Amino acid sequence: MTDHASPPAYQGPRRILSGIQASGALHLGNYLGALKRFVALQDEAPLFVFVADLHAITVWQDPAVLTAQTREIAAAYIASGLDPDKAVIFPQSAVPQHAELAWVFNCVARLGWLDRMTQFKEKSGKHKERASVGLYTYPVLQAADILLYKATEVPVGEDQKQHLELTRDIAAKFNTDFGRPGYFPLPEPVIQGPATRVMSLRDGAAKMSKSDPSDQSRINLTDDADAIVAKVRKAKTDPEPLPETVEGLDGRPEAKNLVAIYAALSDSTAAEVIARFGGQGFGAFKPALAELAVEALAPVTAEMRRLMADPAEIDRALAKGAEQARAIAEVTVAEVKDIVGFWRAP
């Protein structure tokens, strides 16, 4: 009888990795869906959090703005509670092995796999022939980001789950192609929390986004209290009061979004929010939500402003993290070169 046992599983240490693209101002959705989760994970296992500046240039970026946005995202990481002495915080471009490993993975991945990536279709629109090659191969670089550190877990939103599945496919094919079962892990998505997908304040069917042309669609982490209150007050809603049950939110995307934001900011559940506010109109709920948002974000905003006024402090944290990341990345790429058969000086 033929033995069809699965190949040996990865035996390395647990590692967690994620990052945010260096394009546009960070907003409430980033804070609830990513930053708060990173902070909670930094005491669980080694955590690598990078600023994705290589990914950012898949579309045109003003060079001076890109540099500033890299520092701003790093400031947001630290202001949200990430500790540079616990988490490895670094700019992606400061570790050249990301690009080196991505080339090897470009030769492992298959066109058919990339053709199925829905985000490229969404971002390139009707004129995909005008999109950069980098935008098309973005998910392969993402695989390199993850596997360079042999990350076993990746906190992602639902919209990135397909890319993580591609990462697993690339890892499995590399391991098989080169006869190295278990060399790269098959990373698992970490999709959890009450607000992993925060929606626009102007359209409950659209994700809150840095690229939305309307600033009223999002609460930026740099917004002051007056701006937050005004944006919550103007947030789109329907004319009905909040329902008495969570099930009553079905078919009411704007109401569901605001309840989810309140739940995430207060570390409670949607059911608990409905138990408190059910039957009340938005005239009562919105001021409570605005007050909570201001209370939660004010310390983050203040610390971000302090850090951004002292870029040298941010740069020290990024340089330290880049050095730590390179130490691991260099080992992985050296091993991969040997596995692939690249020449090395004797």
Image: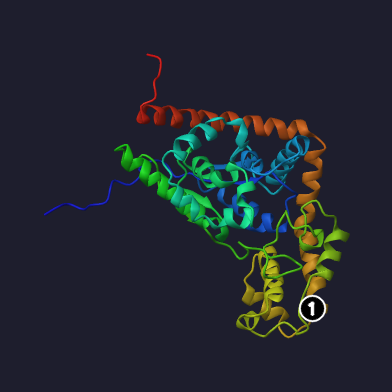
Above or below, 246 against 264 in this view is: below
Given the image, on which type of amino acid does mark 1 rest? Phe
Residue 197 visible, this orientation: yes
> Which residue is painted at 77% across and 76% down in the image?
237
Q: Categorize mark 1 by other alpha carbons within 10 Å: few (<14), some (14-19), many (20+).
A: many
Residue 182 visible, this orientation: no
| Displayed quadrant of residue 90 | top right
Is 288 or 168 nearer to us in this picture?
A: 168
- Residue at the extreme left: 1
| Type of colouring | rainbow
- The location of residue 29, given as percent across then percent down, is 68, 58
| Displayed quadrant of residue 214 | bottom right
- Residue at the extreme top: 346
How many marks the image carries: the answer is: 1
> Which residue is painted at 56% across and 50% down in the image?
41
- The location of residue 103, given as percent across then percent down, is 49, 35
Above or below, 191 against 313 in this view is: below
Is 312 or 114 nearer to us in this picture?
A: 114
- The location of residue 149, given as percent across then percent down, is 48, 38
Q: Secondary structure at mark 1?
A: helix
Task: Give the side of residue 33 with respect to residue 111, left or right.
Answer: right
Please identify the quadrant where the N terminus is shown. Answer: bottom left
> Which residue is painted at 32% across and 40% down in the image?
177
Is 213 or 325 nearer to us in this picture?
A: 213
According to the image, label 1 marks what residue? Answer: 282
- The location of residue 319, given as percent across then percent down, is 65, 29
Please identify the quadrant where the C terminus is shown. Answer: top left
